[in-house]
Image (tube, rainbow, N blue to C red):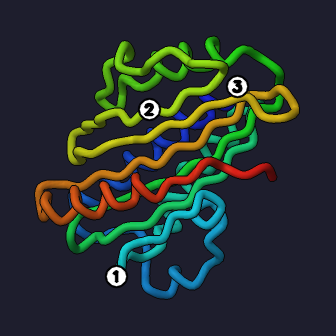
Amino acid sequence: MAGAGLIVALGLALAACGNAAADGSGSGSAAGSDAPVAVWSKLKITPPEGWVRMPKVETAAADAAAKMPSAVTQIEAWGDPGAGCYAVAVDSRGKNVESITGSVERFAAALAPLGVDKTALPKPVKDVIDAPLPIKTAELTGTVRVRMFRGADGRPQSVALACAGNAREPERCTTQCQALQLQLAPPVAP
């Protein structure tokens, strides 16, 4: 169930970003930005100038996703903690063959903690969904773009890019998040 791994990872990653947003400290450092860019490069996303890798956010989300044995999930997080802008990319590949409709229904129900109306997620068309959805947590407002589809092996796969900002520099975060969402390319096979 790739959708469940995706939402667990996104939820925890955004919570970690929200904690960083609340105290302004961030969870990354300039030194962390030298780490390999696995998920973002796979999805053809480039962090904005000045953004840093956020390894603590990635670790929190990866630990949660590891508890979902039905999917293999990779997470990569970047942000500009000084401006209050954060983005998390998630690539989740299901281990079991199941319907995309079933995955989407479970995924939609699990979006409530991110402030998303579960009816906002459209129904799959030809086993594919590609939808931008507004998100709102206690600290962050933004968008998550979700793509869910059936891989060549018949298993559900999903990718998402959640990008949000706090009240510190909302216009800057919105502009940067919109640019990131436009970059999101369809995932490539592992």
Q: Which residue is mark 1?
A: 50
Residue 79 at x, y percent in the picture: 37, 67
Q: Residue at x 69, y 35 (%)?
A: 157
Amino acid type, callout 1: Gly
Residue 111 at x, y percent in the picture: 42, 26
Around disc 1, counting alpha carbons within 10 Å, would you say few (fewer than 14), some (14 to 19), or many (20 or more)? few
Real-space CA distance between mark 1 and mark 3, rounded to the nearest whole angstrom: 35 Å
Q: Residue at x 60, y 31 (%)?
A: 148
Q: Which residue is mark 2?
A: 131
Q: Residue at x 60, y 29 (%)?
A: 3
Q: Is residue 147 left or right of residue 36?
A: left
Real-space CA distance between mark 1 and mark 2, rounded to the nearest whole angstrom: 28 Å
Does residue 90 sit above or below 56 in this rendering? Answer: above
Name the element at disc 3. loop
User: Mark 1 vs mark 2: which is more N-terminal?
Assistant: 1
Dividing the image into 4 quarters, which one contains the N terminus?
A: top right
Real-space CA distance between mark 2 and mark 3, rounded to the nearest whole angstrom: 18 Å
Q: Which residue is mark 3?
A: 1
Residue 75 at x, y percent in the picture: 59, 54
